[in-house]
Image: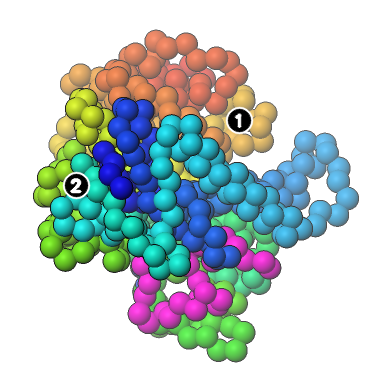
Amino acid sequence: MNFDVVVIGGGPAGYPAAIRAAQNKLSVACVDEWKNFDGSYAFGGTCLNAGCIPSKALLESSELFLRAKEEFAIHGIKLGDITLDLAAMQKRRASIVKTMTGGILALFKSNGVVGMQGHGRLLPGNQVEVTAADGTTLVLTAKDVVIATGSTPIRLKTVPHDGVRIVDSWNALEFDAVPKRLGVIGAGVIGLELGSVWRRLGSEVTILEAAPQLLPMADQTIAKEALRHFKKLGLDIKLGATVSGATVKGDAVEVEYADAKGAGKLTVDKLVVAVGRRPFTAGLLAEGTEVGVDARGFITVDEHCRTNVAHVWAVGDVVRGPMLAHKGKEEGVMVADRIAGKAADVNYKVIPAVIYTAPEIAWVGQTEEEVKASGRAYKVGSFPFAASGRARAMEAAQGSTKIISAVDNDDILGVHIIGPMAGELIGEAVLAMEYSASTEDLQRTIHAHPTLSEALHEASLAVDKRAIDAINR
Ligand code: NAD
């Protein structure tokens, strides 16, 4: 079978590449091998099946459970005993995932993309071999091939994964009972989000983090504030704690680690390993394809996601840059446009990051630490949600918004938010930075009252000590 474009991988980088290529009037096939625990194939990759979407479903449900228990009374809402129906919660999670992955098939159909389920392998000469579940193979020929095979959780040799007691993030989204004691290795994005879910549902959660500080990639004012909130939730985060091994003993897992206090031992019922992800290229590149792979396993690409082989492109988690679905999506779209001869770029300087904890954490651009290190003179404006009428009305007045602005030309260098709906609020900052708005542009933009977005407005005013609703320092 011949196609203009064959995309290997139908996750958040691959399926948008396929759809955009079809919109560009190219003939497209998208091959995906994702299989769920029940053996069924599904498009959508890790994000839809085992990451972004199911985790957000459980974060929402568990947050509502906690708020019903702890917050509704403050609003004057009296309820009887609040009990957890985890089976119903999990059923809802699964049904959202099913709807969303089914949505990709519908999008493929309406755009004329041929979706194929099976393992895709790149052969020399821009051919892709597809092996179906029954072992039968088919060879596709393409003018252009886009590799979008994503990433897979890193496993630690000394912490043997069994999928029952010692698990990865996917297993931890599908627990059918709340573990009494949950251990998590890694206080990264996954560790914090999953730790929050199970803590809210009643687990005693201990997170062991090797780094001496929390979220080293985030602005440290925000990270320090986040640590306070996580402690308040009851997450026991041990920083500077490196895990050396774990052993399943009966129904429990014994974890050995070392921190500043010396050797430590932790006994838990389930242990989640969330120490990062690595690019996934197993069985992908047949001999003779000559696609370059770096020492860490990433497919090497230029700024337009071209590999070293003509007409072979790679996008998403399998290439350099942050492992974020929205970064992969933009790369997929850029490549599909470039294949069609159109101009397209990804602005790697303006990629938002969001951690979906409560309060949420979101940022775009440089942290204060990065700006300081660059030597550029800067001003900072911040605004606490405690001074936001809307946040108060929502009973969500924790956190703050921080804007870092250049002294020389008033450019917005970075925006950092911890607080209610931070992931939604950051969109305005992303747009402002994408359009090279100055801090003054933000100051002169009318924000509806009372909304959470006013916090961003007030923070921009605070940059020049002109905030109205907070004391300027
Ligand atoms: P991560 O890289 O964000 O965090 C892993 C953490 O594990 C690090 O802080 C590291 O210091 C720690 N660690 C590593 N080895 C350790 C050891 N032996 N003992 C103790 N700590 C150890 O990785 P992640 O949380 O697994 O997430 C994987 C990827 O998925 C990331 O790139 C992340 O950005 C992405 N992701 C993003 C979102 C989101 O955008 N909301 C959500 C989930 C995952």
Q: Which mark is residue 391?
A: 1
Q: Residue at x 67, y 28 (%)?
A: 393
Q: In this orientation, which residue lies closer to the viewer: 23 or 186?
A: 23
Q: Is residue 473 above or below residue 103?
A: above
Q: Is residue 65 left or right of residue 421?
A: right
Magenta segment boundaries in residue numbering: 152-178
**Residue nearest the viewer, comparing 150 with 426:** 150
Q: Is residue 176 magenta?
A: yes
Closer to us: 70 or 160: 160
Q: Residue 109: image x %, image y %? A: 48, 36
Instruction: Tell whether position 407 is magenta.
Output: no
Vertical arrangement, residue 90 with respect to residue 219, above or below: below
Q: Nearer the observer, disc 2 or disc 1?
A: 2
Where ligand 1 lies, by quadrant? bottom left
Residue located beneath label 2 in the image = 312
Measure the alpha-carbon separation of dots 2 and 1: 49 Å
Q: Residue furthest front?
A: 1
Is residue 264 rendered to the left or right of residue 278?
A: right
Query: The C terminus is located in which quarter?
Result: top left
* Relative to 39, 377 lies left or right: left
Is residue 245 in view from this perspective? Answer: yes
